[in-house]
Amino acid sequence: MNAGRIGADAIAAKGRWGAHKWLILRRSSQLAILALFLAGPWFGLWIVKGNLNFSYTLGLLPLTDPYVLLQSVLAGHRPERNALIGVAIVAAFYLLVGGRVFCAWVCPVNPVTDLAAWLRNRLGIKGGAHISRHARFWILSMTLVLALATGSIAWELVNPVSMLHRGLFFGLGLAWTVVLAVFLLDLFVMNRAWCGHLCPVGAFYSLLGRRSPLRVAATRRSACNDCNDCFAVCPEPLVIKAPLKDGDKGVGPTIVSAQCTNCGRCIDVCAKDVFTFGIHFARPVSNQAGATQAASK
Amino acid sequence: MTTARRQFIFDAARMACGVGLLGLGLGLYVKQAQALPSVVFRPPGAGAEKDFLGACIRCGLCVRDCPPQILALAKPEQPIATGTPYFIARSGPCEMCENIPCVKACPTGALDHKLTDITKARMGLAVLVDHETCLNFLGLRCDVCYRVCPLIDKAITLEPRHNERTGRHTIFEPVVHSDACTGCGKCEAGCVLQIAAIKVYPTALAKGELGSHYRIGWEEKRKAGGSLVAPEIEHQYNMPEGLKYEHGKGLAPSGPPPAPGVGVDALRVPNPGRNAAPLGGVPQNIPGGGLADRLSIEAPR
């Protein structure tokens, strides 16, 4: 365990850029997506219309959020063509790159909760409530059951993710209070409470990309010096443990848990360059079990 | 093992109860959100509110493609389902674009793509609610709601009636016809009053409905192409014995000649037995609207 701040060793070993490469790329991706959506309402440059639930790019490319469309279908609606084409494209994309890539690279709530986690760490706030990381799947199930039972897309009434994203382009209103609540929840009540424990959107996308080939792997795990920076910086630290530490038990080095967001922060903060992005086609069986075992401990 | 299983069951129960409680709250909120305020309207092609909330994915494409920019997406603090599109008739009515771009933009069909003729849209129904302040009802010729109506003379007509106050003018009463009104709200937006006398309401609030067992006689007759009561009975005036009155023909004796002293002579009806004058000539002998009227006036005494 190093005494310094998270990533200090990595900065010393790889320089500022080397220790923040994936973080900067990720923030660029988030900003670029926001900028594309904002260009219309702010500058009248209509490259993209809509929001994350459905967007239409250059009058050609429809993109539909599979989660909201699934709720609509469960509510008893038969969508038109554009929504269906859009959902096929989006689903295919996340099947390839990993479902929770949405969380780390696209979702507008991620910078908010990342800021809360960073601040929590800097201020040394510890402890708080404990909720299982499986809660999100229960909430996900609840939203789907509600759509079916009420014939209404219930979750969209309160969803902070779409509320923030939509609000930025169509008028925020009091949606900022909901976003602030998520921020304070993550900061004071519980570490990584929203994205790591509760959010059903992330839970849905994790299921979508369960078998995706694009994975982070601890390819040079023998070089690990147990500094624990990767665990400290990871929004889903349980996913790292088995691939990094259980090599002697026959666990492969690839992080195969569906909860990995492919954010690449572990790659950044590792001074020993243990982690890399790679392609992995094997079925997530043994390591999945490892991850859930770790989760139940 | 048993303790582990017990723990698992307890954990699952705790989670189910917690999330169930959340779900209950959200479910009740859904019920609330399904009640749309009566001043708020959905874009053309939206179905019933309950169906719309299951079909609309809150993307805002209709808002973007609305040429007059009257649509907005609901904010969380508004009493409208968060993120759904709406317009307010009084401040920004639907302009009824012929090509309906909002419907075309809708990716899910929450705005029904089968709606291709904007005059077939049913966003609500205008009602002239306040007969006490409407300028036309006061006898003035405001007519603004009628003039701005995109379906003038179909959705709103002016029906003349006598102005009892002045005794010599006409009141032109604006009347909305539900078979043509799209609920666009142009009339409500155009109403010159401080608060509009004509307002658009959700159709369910504005429109009455006959009981399903009701049949309107004359319509059933028209549909059937003839009377459904067989045989059709001709109206007969109830006359003293020996007399018959037919509308347009007049009074005539009928049946056997009446016995003397019945009063027929007193009514100066010639006795056909004695006089072979044509029957049609009889009523002309009776002044003041004919015998039937006089008899009916005298009858109650």
Image (tube, coloured by chain):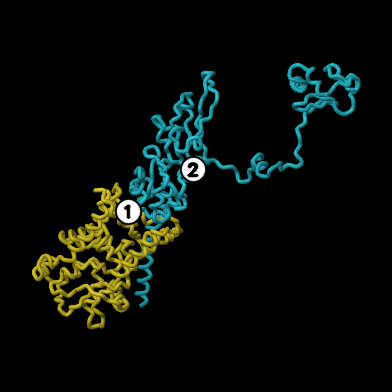
Q: Viewed as shown, does residue A122 lie left or right of B147?
A: left
Q: Is residue B95 above or below residue B257?
A: below
Q: Nearer the viewer, mark 2 or mark 1?
A: 1
Residue ID at (51%, 25%): B171
For residue B14, say whether it is visible. no
For label 2, count other residues whose C-alpha is less than 10 Å away and answer few (under 14), some (14-19) or many (20+).
some
- Chain letter for the yellow part: A
Query: Dot 1, how many residues are within 10 Å of its Cα: few (below 14), some (14-19), or many (20+)?
Result: many
Mark yes or no: residue B199 visible: yes
Q: Residue at x 35, y 42 (%)?
A: B68
Residue B218 position by quadrant = top right
- Say which amino acid is labelled 2: Thr
Q: Nearer the viewer, residue B87 or B211?
A: B87
> Pointer 2 indicates a residue of which chain?
B
Q: Amino acid at mark 1?
A: Gly
Q: Which residue is mark 1?
A: A50
Q: Label 2: which residue?
A: B203
Note whether A134 is above or below A181 in the view shown.
Answer: below
Residue A199 position in % (x across, y down): 31, 61
The quadrant of the rendering that contains the N terminus of chain B is bottom left
Q: Which one is nearer the viewer's eye here, B72 or A210?
A: B72
Subunit of mark 1?
A
Q: Quadrant of the C terminus of chain B?
A: top right
The chain drawn in cyan is B
